[in-house]
Image: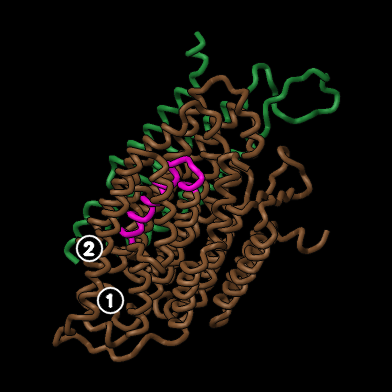
Chain colours: A green, B brown
Amino acid sequence: MELLGLYNYFVFAVLLMVGLYCILARTNIIKSLIGLTIFQGAVFLLYISMDKIDGGTGPIILEGAPADTIYANPLPQVLILTAIVVGISTTALGLAVAVRIREAYGTIEEDEIQEMDREQ
Amino acid sequence: MTLHDQLPALLVVVPLVTAPIAYLLRAHGLPWAAAVAANVTAFIIACALAATVYGGETIIYEMGGWPAPYGIVLHIDALSALMAMLVTGASAAALIFGAKSLADEVGEEIAPSFFAAWILCTAGLTGMVITGDAFNIFVFMEISSLSTYILVSAGPDRRALVATYRYIVMGTIGATLYLIGVGFLYMATGSLNTVDIAARIGDVTEVRLLLVAAGFITVGLALKAAIFPLHSWMPNAYTFAPNVVTVFIAAASAKVSLYVLIRIDYAIFYKNIPNHELQLALLLVPMGILALFAGSMLAIYEKNLKRLLAYSSVAQVGYIALGISMASVSGLTAAIVHMFNHGLIKGGMFMAVACLALRYRSVNIANLAGAGRAMPWTMAAFVIGGLGLIGVPLTPGFISKWYLVLGALEKGGLGAVLVAAILLSSLLAVIYVWKVVEVAYFKEPRANAVPVEREAPLVMLIPTWIVVLAGLWIAIDSSMPVTMATLGAETLLGAR
């Protein structure tokens, strides 16, 4: 049963591989960027899973809460907030580059772009 | 608290604060001036820090007064000070050198954002070098990477955009793998401070978890450092970036990832995973040797001068990887000295290429016929750099290869194979450097080519020669980088 208890981590691994496959297998730049986002999203899940403590509540100290309250670890949550911001910036930059590629080449299919570069 | 105590924080804060200011300066030339001011200041700070730690002590700076392991600390020893000098020096030199070349390649309207990105890149790289927090390294890594993507995409050719896109994908995968590794480390030890992790990791009984963490971190950083065969983003990014950006990223940015690789692997994993020496060698020795030969062979067959130098960087990173894999003081010293020396050599060579590109409007080797006569000073700088890549005595490349061979000889039988590989790949470097020399000095320009009669402008030539002469000076009196690298290596291996 212990293995089933780790299903968060299985989902993490599956998402990671789905993202990687999507990056590698797609020639469309937008689809690859979606893959990249999934790839990064998997890591968010990893961090969020590790901060969970059995019976732990949100890491906010309330007045009148019993002294023996168990709290989840707030540090990974903070870390992953940072990582989410980084992920969004990366995606935004990638999409901006995609827009400029489309302006310069008229396509966002990598194989077509390669074809055009070869002719140059 | 005197100003001197605050220097570690200022090294990052000065560029970080200047970046938005540079973005707001809309007058001609001002963003460039702001970037130069920030980078020169950072370089002076880095030199002052290096002078402080030269004797072997370590500066620990607690950000916001929070002690480790609760707060983020900046951790500066000889190794990080040496890298900080390399990063800020390369950035300042490239900026001062590049005013004319950038005005030529980067349009006036994007100049404020371009220079803001440049300053952020310096801030990110210096941050990676001096921080003592594993997650903080990731944050600074992404600051520097995102701004490097912007710098590369400013290249004049539209292929710069595709190169940027590849770089974004590969760079993000690398950084994410590193982040996963740090996550596993945090799970195992409950700490993010590198010193604290190293202290706690001995209690971890689950070696497999540590191995997975080490694997993710090493591969992620190898991807960022462009160790063969994970280099695929690098040649095109170097080729299509604006020439001055190539000077900067070739000299500094890939080196910083190698630095983090050395730092994390030796400070945390080396003593705490059984047989880690062997695991590291099994990964890095084949990669390094392949890099030496594949990089050199690709360079030999390359027609574009910038891509030729990029492939040569792939080979040179191979030397550094070999040095890292040796897990001995001399091997690590060689790797660190070569990071520094290769930064000087490649920086100088790409500066010469930028001069050539300004006059010839092309970096195809075939078009550079007659450059030896038309631009004697530029080509002389290029040739001295080339001799450094080969490792001829009295060039900085010789110093680092000397230490690398010494390190290899300590290893006995396998070491002899490494020495043979190092010497053989140096011969390959002769071929690709000679290829450029032959065209530039001994070929007549094509009849229909526009004749180039003028040497590069002095504002570009003088910085190029300052870098070249600094390299030659290091080659004659190499005590500064070697002392700092030895100190760094001994600290990492726990010999001190």
Q: Residue at x 58, y 27 (%)?
A: B187
Task: Give the residue number, with chain letter if any, for mark 1.
Answer: B362
Mark 2 lies on a secondary structure that is loop
> What residue do we see at 43% from left, 47% from top?
B407
Q: Secondary structure at mark 1?
A: loop
What whole-number distance in Å separates the C-alpha atoms at marks 2 and 1?
15 Å
Magenta part, dominant SS: helix
Q: Is residue A100 left or right of residue B83?
A: left
Residue A113: tell me if it is visible: no
Residue at image location 55% in from the left, 62% down from the top? B479
**Chain of the residue under the numbered disc 2 shown in the image:** B
Residue at coordinates 46% horizontally, 49% vertically from top-left?
A91
Asked if residue B410 lies left or right of residue B4, the reply is left
Q: Residue furthest bottom?
A: B453
Q: Amino acid at mark 1?
A: Ser
Judge from the rendering whether residue B85 lies leftward or rightward of residue A109; answer left or right.
right
Chain where mark 1 sits = B
Picture quadrant where residue A118 is located: bottom left
Measuring from the top left, give residue B70's x and y in whole percent. Answer: 73, 38
Q: Nearer the viewer, residue A91 or B458?
A: B458
In magenta segment, residue B315: yes
- Magenta range is B310-332
Provide the residue designation for mark 2: B302
Looking at the image, residue A65 lies above or below residue B452: above
Three-letter code, disc 2:
Glu
Q: Position of residue B273 (x, y in %)?
A: 51, 28
Residue B151 occupies quadrant = bottom left
- In terms of sequence position, does the residue under pointer 2 or pointer 1 come before the other? 2
Q: Residue furthest left?
A: B447
User: Is residue B410 rendered magenta in the image?
Assistant: no
